[in-house]
Image: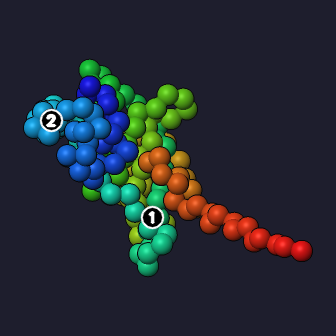
Amino acid sequence: MREEILRLLERNGRIDLCDAAKMLGMTEVDLANEIAQMEKEQIICGYTTLINWDKTSTEKVTALIEVKVTPQRGRGFSQFAEKICQYPEVESMYLLSGNYDFVVILQGKTMREVARFVSDKLAVVDSVLSTSTLFVLKKYKDHGSILESKPKAERRRITL
């Protein structure tokens, strides 16, 4: 049942509790208790709103920074991850397989601001061996949502 609750919340975190309970065949009280328990267990870690910033006047730059590090004895990659996650600019951080150990995703106002983060905060960490920064040029789909959909072509009826 938890998996069904999580899938429903992942698709729509603003769903009305009464509607969700009906869809899941539960009482509102049972659903609220289950959600509260999953929040306590940190299965549900937060609720966010997906915003298409390109449709606003706010300028934002999204960067994916690949990072190669030397794992610390007895701690592996955890010490590095804990340190970098503390920076408010960091939106997401993932341990990877492949050529790089981590990808750090952040948003800044400008490319220069992102570059400053890399040079002043990330690259200076002792265990960092190298970084590679990629800038997002356009978002088409984010968190499962298509950000820009084409308007449906309307057909005109032609009679002879």
Is 156 in front, or is 124? 156
Q: Residue at x 47, y 46 (%)?
A: 144
- Up/down of 39 relative to 108, above or below: above
Where disc 2 sits, the SS reads loop
Residue 46 is situated, as x and y percent measured from the top left of the image, at 23, 46
Q: Position of residue 108 (x, y in %)?
A: 40, 64
Name which residue type carries label 2: Thr
Placement of the N terminus among the 4 image quadrants = top left
| Residue that extends furthest to the top in the rendered view of this protein | 74
Q: Which quadrant of the view contains residue 9?
A: top left
Distance from Cα at disc 2 to Cα at disc 1:
35 Å
Q: Of circles 2 and 1, which is in front?
A: 2
Residue denoted by label 1: 52
Residue 53 image point, x, y percent: 44, 68
Q: Quadrant of the C terminus?
A: bottom right
Residue, disc 2 = 27
Q: Secondary structure at mark 1?
A: loop
Give me the residue at 46% from left, 32% from top.
96
Spot the residue most to the front.
160
73, above or below 32, in the image: above
Coloring scheme of the render?
rainbow
Residue 35 falls in which quadrant of the image?
top left
Q: Is residue 19 visible?
A: yes
* Mark 2 nearby-residue class (10 Å; few <14, some 14–19, many ≥20): some
| First in sequence: mark 2 vs mark 1 | 2
